[in-house]
Amino acid sequence: MYGQVIYDQIADKAGLPCYKCHLCGKWVRGLGYHIYHKHKITSREYKKMFGLDLKQSLLGTKEKLNRRNKTLENKTYLNLAAGEAQRQKVKTGVVKLANYKRSEQTKKRIKNNLKNKPKEIELKL
């Protein structure tokens, strides 16, 4: 069993702090920012410490929208174009990525996704 993020959906919809910090009990809008600046640990360390899903977002809906809008305003999304050539090399196998150790959570997610993946049906005409 994995830990749970303490999240208040009603507060999130109102744009109020919606995540509760496991360390100090404070309610915040952006938990990742809070734990990094107040507790001096990364989001990944925090998630591992409390058994949280590593893919779990630690940002409220309003905060995500604010950051998305800032990205569009500042045009920082254009930086993705600079890395496209490298991503293509990885996709085609020209460049190999280093193997890394996957968490048990990720292994289970991959296994479930493969198990529940709909089988492709080949149509014969």
Image (tube, rainbow, N blue to C red):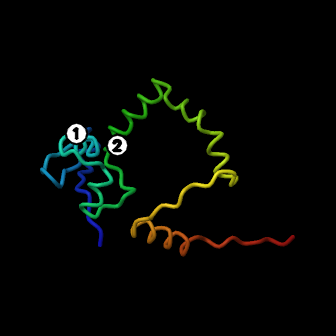
Asked if 20 appears above or below 84 in the picture, the reply is: below
Q: Nearer the viewer, residue 98 or 27?
A: 98
Q: Nearer the viewer, residue 69 or 43?
A: 43
User: Residue 26 shows which numbered tag?
Assistant: none
Q: Residue at x 23, y 49 (%)?
A: 19
Asked if 125 appears above or below 49 in the picture, the reply is: below
Pair 2/1: label in front: 1
User: Residue 61 shows which numbered tag?
Assistant: 2
Give the x, y percent position of residue 97. Answer: 57, 54
Give the x, y percent position of residue 9. Answer: 27, 50
Judging from the image, what secondary structure is the residue with disc 2 in? helix
Where does label 1 land, which residue?
37
**Label 2 crowding class (10 Å Cα cut-off): few <14, some 14-19, many 20+?**
some
The three-letter amino acid code for the residue at tag 1 is His
Q: Nearer the viewer, residue 88 or 7?
A: 88
The three-letter amino acid code for the residue at tag 2 is Thr
Give the quadrant of the N terminus: bottom left
Asked if 1 appears above or below 86 in the picture, the reply is: below
